[in-house]
Image (cartoon, coloured by chain):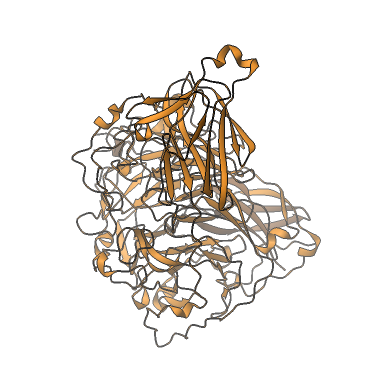
Amino acid sequence: MLTHSFLLMPALISLSAHCLSNEHSSSSSPEHEHSPAHAAHAHKSEPPAWNGYTPQGTVNPAPFTPYYVPDGATSYDSASPLVHYKGTWADAHSPDFVGGSSRRTAQPGASFFASFTGTGVEWFGSTGPEYGPADVFVDGRLVQRVDTQSEKGHFKQRLFWKFGLEDRKHTFKVIHAGTEGEKKHREHTVIDVDALVIYKGAPPPPPQPQHAHEYPPSRVLAESEPAPVHAAAPPPVQGWELVQKGSSGVSAMQLAIISPTHAIIIDKVEHNPLTIDNHPAWATLYNLETHALKPLHVKSNSFCAGGAFLGNGTLVNVGGNPVYEDRTASADFKQTDGLQTVRLFGPCDAADVTECDIYEYTTRIHLSTPRWYSSVVRVQDGSVLIIGGSKRGGWINNATTNNPTIEFFPPKYIHDANGMPIHLQFLADTLNANLFPISFLLPDGRIFIAANRDAIIYDWKKNTETRLARIPNGVRVTYPMTGTGLLLPLAPENDYKPEVLICGGSTLDDTKPAYEMSSQDPASDQCVRLLLTPEGIERGWQVEHMPHPRLMPDAVLLPTGTVVIVNGAGSGIAGYKNVRHQVGVSNADNPVLTPVLYDPTAPVGKRFTTGLPQSAIPRMYHSTATLTPNGDIMIAGSNPNIDRSEVAYGTEYRVEWLRPPYMTRQRPVIDKAPHAINFGEKAKVLVTIPDDLRNEKLKGEFPYFLSGVEVVQLTA
Amino acid sequence: MRNTVALMDLAYVTHATHANSRLVYLVAVPEDEHTLTVTGPPNGEIYPPGPGWLYIIAGDVASIGRKVMVGNGEGPPVDYGAIKK
């Protein structure tokens, strides 16, 4: 597949101020027929993929319906003795039903009843024109009237669900809800029960190690380096709050703020509880104020895609996974292979997100080569540079699957590549742990890229790379030895001198086979900084140590210039189903449940603040965190599983909000600000500064302001 | 005493990569008690054109952010040489 049929491009990328209109959508109506014909879409010649793990039966994908029994749950068929019936019920038989049969009634007042011990229950059944209302009772109380009528027939639908119940005995009852007022119709309406899925209580997360030094040190300390200091029991830091509120509906593998009111969450194809068009959704908008969800249409598998906003505000989401996972390979989206996909999400700034959706024009707009785990950097002309990746799904990269190239979106006619991939030797030299390279645009227009133990500055206009010193102490920082990176704040006072910070990762040998790696292999606690000026490069990487070792951390910049490091595991490696001593199927263990604060401007040795609120939720592989417009940190995801699981480390939908102390203080207010600001142009911003902040001094010295120039001096 | 204006890209987050995460402090001059004259970033190298968020910081307290489009809001250049055979 080549990129040479890009006819829609100019029209698409000129979109700026609104969502793409629906008429552009070519998403077909994913109606199921009540027939098993979908199984005929066999993908017999597909190579193994999906994180390298291909379960048996992959060649016969089934229709993608909401019915699913995750690890840790039990399904009871309609014919199970668990389910007791009252009134007139009859069995209907079809291979499309769970267990080959479904039990249905057309009698108003007829009911079924089940008692169970656990924390949740789901009722699966059919919908269609002849189906009608039902009243659902949990523990004897009416909790919902469910209308099972739909225009077309669908089977294995989740008609009702209740999670988060206290772990004890519960009762569940559904009554055919015909009423006198509906007499004309009720003789014709039916309800059915195909299966009930009961959730047992999830085991509590494993205890957090008391002290970081329980992990053997994995690194060799440099001679000049001060020994790390681990506080035994840090006092709690006042003012920070951690609140759990909201559910992401799909697992939050990818997360980005799109507007004052919404974040976009993109997952892989799996059996999420959120549904769209009668199948599980794998992308949604999340309302930051009301916590409401708006599922999005995605046609391809967005597993392992990267994303970035273009200069006009359109979000591009590129790459992903092929479609041939057994239980998540859907007749709905057939052969839409995600590896070369470009998904577009137009600007969606209003609180009403009804018209916002994801659009794919697979035959016209796609990458020039398959990319799995590539990084995406917006460059100075508003286009994006797409860096590296693997040519197919897998776990750790290798020479066979490596895609040691870059390309642009929209494509560029440079370096004799004519829009096709441009070779980047650095990506060939950094195998094996080199996926999702840590990449940032620098203030001179070049790109910093770190992969595995190495780093370069890449000049994309000249197609030249400048190699930097190796990251010290053998620490690898990119997938699956995943660390995290940030460009520290840029300020005019020091002429925007760029400095990068990279934290976490692993010193594991990336040439070892998986069976020689363990979920118990310690992660690295190392942070490194490099000032990207001639003097800084000469000085080399500066080494520090976090209070905890961390694999797969998230580093989130606050507007105040400090960094919150959150999420991740204390041991193991990214991915699942690969190494020894898996927990569930997670390659990593020992979740780090406490965020730490890093102040890049504080003196060495005083930069880390411990004692922030501890979470009860492990945030392992596929977890995310982002600053919100409100100024707090949204924490979501965690899913080291091939499909939704309810056993440790299960698929996590709970959202947490880490609130810095300023959230509860009287805050400065932007009363009015321009919607757009051009380069070097002046604009008026109206503000209200609380009296008690007018004369407050910044804590600590701010290296960015060493020149002594005040950015703003507000006088009362 | 210092108050600052931060222009931030809140990033696209996945697999511990925070793509395009960025914080650029803007030059801002107070005109009166309630008015700042803020100068956009010098060029697209300092902050690539695209969406961003403005926060005012007073002491160690940040305001709620306001979305702002940096640059002229136009789409990136389309190079027909690269998309036509």
Specify whether A571 is left or right of A580. right
In the displayed structure, A638 sits above or below A497; it is above
Rendered colour, chain B: brown
Choose top left, top right, bottom left or bottom right for residue B26.
Answer: bottom right
Farthest top residue in view: A184
Q: Nearer the viewer, residue A18 or A25?
A: A25
Residue A264 picture location, percent across and down: 51, 44
Residue A566 picture location, percent across and down: 52, 64
Specify whether A498 is left or right of A268. right
Is residue A367 in view? no
Q: Nearer the viewer, residue A370 or B54?
A: A370
Query: In the image, what residue occupies the spot 44% across and 21% down?
Result: A152
Q: Nearer the viewer, residue A524 or A40?
A: A40
In the displayed structure, A170 sits above or below A229; it is above
Choose top left, top right, bottom left or bottom right for residue A368.
Answer: top left
Specify whether A397 is left or right of A652. left
Query: In the image, what residue occupies the spot 48% across and 26% down?
Result: A22
Residue A59 picture location, percent across and down: 23, 40
- Give the total of numbered labels: 0
Image quadrant in which the N terminus of chain A is located: top left
Farthest bottom residue in view: A223
Residue A578 picture location, percent across and down: 29, 60
Is residue B32 in view? yes
Image quadrant in which the C terminus of chain A is located: bottom right
Chain letter for orange, please: A
In the displayed structure, A336 sits above or below A307; it is above
Choose top left, top right, bottom left or bottom right for residue A125.
Answer: top left
